[in-house]
């Protein structure tokens, strides 16, 4: 009986592992120079170099792209987040609720919205917005800001984001990478990607 | 909640009338201890590795003054001889938690420091954790639950197989939950640590009644937090410390009964504690507010304010309401920021918050005044140029 239970548990674990270890069919290549719609919304980008988009998405209106794996460089697109909707899909609406986009959210509030989301979702206590300034994104007035945080893997990361609000909906692109080496190496790729973004 | 308050009254006023247990005594102290046997040596080796990683980690608050103060409180609680075996690390994490591992590493979370109201309450938690350490409960449980490490090996396999970082981190969480299980003590061990914790306090110069008070306070916070989230019953099993230390009023009552009655008139070190935590209070409050647990944060702020409102507390309350962001919250937030400014007219961040809340309640002229004052006080703020842009938009609407 004990033997049978052990076999059953090994098969079960292999089954779970199987669902997560099939990257080839799950993720997609975003080719250089080809227009790509983001998260099936009106926002699109034309990547100057090839990127990988991950199948695992933080929410219906968000998408993650990476060059070397999301731990090393991660671009997250948030496209058309409406009032009352959080940036990430909540794991549990009651117990682990996340801050929401609101009708009266101002550009200056957006770093706090992202901070509350990252702190709440990843359960991190080290997060600081280091700099924010007016910018242009999708042809509109926008906010550009930088931040630092330490994730559960204890690796200090740097982040840069640009966000705007169009018709009460939030459009934002964030870039996060380890402070050591990776941020500096790929931040320009992120900036070129942002520069290619447009909204229908 | 009414029931809980009634029970609190029962415990604090009639604590001594609960069945008279003999007052706990301390076991003789063995002095410098070295691990014995394969299990214990192995456990210490793993623990030493963990401590090395912890020492270099960015989650540690490296404030020698604060750490020295915490060590001093521990030494006053358990005695100078016993406390020599402990190294204290303060972890920047907003949850109520503290733990002690077998090699003498004591982890104190900033969430615990925020919630303690005086030295005696802190001493009660540290004494309880030291009690687990002195009785080597981890080793006993480890032997019993060795199968948990098999689960850990599987977690490593799954994490490697996971194709994404998010998949990966969910398996890392498994590692923590299994460790949580590993460090979860059984009820008898909890009772033993409770008894020892109170025994240390009885022998110290601090008020032993604090042991049951912090417990009751923590239960009240979880009850309020659960209600704010819409739960009918308090979610004790969802909070790190109370999940591994089941809170029962019976436990609080027993601790109240075990506390030396004549100790009730002792000092609880309220002022010393407030002075030691003051440099960090604003930061701890800010971290707590951004966790997004409105009920718990409001409870903590009002509980700390029982000994007098300060500008930090009013400001934190303003931030809490502004970040929740309902129209009625902004009205309240404006008042709270105003109270913070009344106590500290140079509190730049309160002007910023007030400006934002005023803007959202349609009071544009007052908002502009608040933003201007913010920029005067903090011209090099990281978001100064954004605030200037807001001011410009306010001026455009006016004209």
Image (cartoon, grey):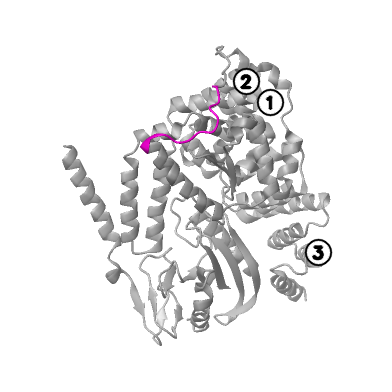
* Image vertical order of residue B186 relative to residue B370, above or below: above
Residue placed at 56% from the left, 11% from the top? B20
Q: Secondary structure at mark 1?
A: loop
Query: B36 and B320: which one is in front?
Result: B36
Q: Which residue is mark 2?
A: B259
Discs 1 and 3 carry the same chain letter: yes
Quadrant of the image containing the N terminus of chain B: top right
* Image vertical order of residue B185 relative to residue B288, above or below: above
Query: B228 and B219: which one is in front?
Result: B219
Disc on res. B377: 3
* Chain letter for mark 1: B
Quarter of image, res B385: bottom right
Q: Can you give x and y, in whole percent of width and height, for residue A62 in the image?
A: 44, 68
Q: Which residue is mark 1?
A: B207
Q: Secondary structure at mark 2?
A: loop
Q: CA distance from mark 3 to mark 2?
A: 50 Å
Question: Do residues under tags 3 and 2 come within 8 Å of each other at their CB atoms?
Answer: no
């Amino acid at each position: 009986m004990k033997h049978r239970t052990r076999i059953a548990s090994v098969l079960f674990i292999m089954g779970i592992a199987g669902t997560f270890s099939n990257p080839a069919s799950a993720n997609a290549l975003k080719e250089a120079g080809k227009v790509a719609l983001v998260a099936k919304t009106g926002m699109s980008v034309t990547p100057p170099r090839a990127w990988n988009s991950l199948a695992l998405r933080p929410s219906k209106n968000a998408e993650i792209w990476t060059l070397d794996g999301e731990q090393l460089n991660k671009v997250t697109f948030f496209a058309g987040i409406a009032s009352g909707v959080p940036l990430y899909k909540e794991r549990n609406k009651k117990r682990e609720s996340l801050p929401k986009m609101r009708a009266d959210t101002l550009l200056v509030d957006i770093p706090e919205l992202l901070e509350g989301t990252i702190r709440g979702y990843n359960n991190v206590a080290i997060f600081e917005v280091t700099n924010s300034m007016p910018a242009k994104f999708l042809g509109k007035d926008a906010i550009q800001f930088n931040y630092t945080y330490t994730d559960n893997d204890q690796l200090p990361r740097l982040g840069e984001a640009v966000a705007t609000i169009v018709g009460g909906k939030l459009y934002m692109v964030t870039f996060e990478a380890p402070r050591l080496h990776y941020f500096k190496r790929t931040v320009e790729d992120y900036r070129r990607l942002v520069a290619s973004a447009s909204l229908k | 909640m009414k029931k809980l308050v009634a029970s609190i009254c029962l415990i604090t006023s009639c604590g001594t009338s609960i069945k008279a247990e003999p007052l706990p005594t301390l076991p003789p102290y063995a002095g410098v201890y070295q691990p014995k046997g394969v299990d214990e040596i192995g456990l210490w080796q793993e623990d030493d590795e963990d401590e090395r990683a912890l020492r270099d980690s960015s989650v540690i608050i490296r404030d020698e003054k604060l750490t020295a103060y915490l060590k001093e409180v521990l030494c006053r609680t358990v005695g100078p001889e016993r406390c020599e075996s402990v190294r204290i690390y303060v972890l920047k994490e907003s949850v109520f938690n503290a733990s002690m591992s077998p090699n003498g590493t004591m982890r104190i979370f900033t969430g615990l420091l925020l919630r303690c109201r005086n030295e005696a309450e802190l001493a009660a938690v540290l004494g309880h954790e030291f009690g687990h350490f002195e009785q080597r409960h981890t080793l006993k449980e480890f032997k019993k639950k060795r199968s948990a490490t098999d689960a850990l090996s599987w977690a490593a396999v799954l994490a490697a197989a996971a194709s994404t970082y998010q998949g990966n981190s969910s398996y890392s969480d498994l590692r923590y939950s299994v460790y949580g299980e590993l460090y979860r003590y059984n009820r008898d061990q909890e009772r033993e640590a409770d008894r020892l914790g109170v025994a240390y306090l009885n022998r110290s110069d601090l008020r032993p009644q604090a042991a049951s008070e912090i417990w009751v306070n923590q239960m009240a916070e979880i009850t309020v937090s659960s209600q704010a989230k819409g739960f009918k019953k308090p979610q004790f099993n969802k909070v790190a410390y109370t999940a591994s230390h089941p809170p029962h009023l019976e436990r609080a009552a027993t601790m109240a009964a075990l506390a030396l009655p004549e100790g009730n008139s002792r000092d609880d070190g309220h002022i010393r504690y407030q002075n030691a935590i003051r440099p960090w209070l604003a930061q701890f409050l800010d971290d707590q507010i951004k966790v997004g647990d409105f009920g718990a944060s409001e409870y903590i702020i009002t509980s700390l304010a029982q000994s007098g409102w300060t500008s930090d507390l009013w400001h934190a309350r303003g931030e809490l309401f502004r970040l929740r962001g309902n129209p009625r919250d902004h009205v309240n937030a404006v008042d709270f920021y105003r109270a913070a400014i009344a106590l500290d007219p140079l509190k730049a961040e309160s002007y910023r918050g007030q400006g934002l809340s005023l803007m959202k309640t349609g009071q544009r002229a007052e908002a502009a005044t608040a933003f201007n004052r913010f920029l005067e006080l903090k011209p090099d703020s990281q978001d100064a140029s954004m605030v200037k842009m807001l001011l410009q938009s306010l001026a455009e609407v006016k004209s």
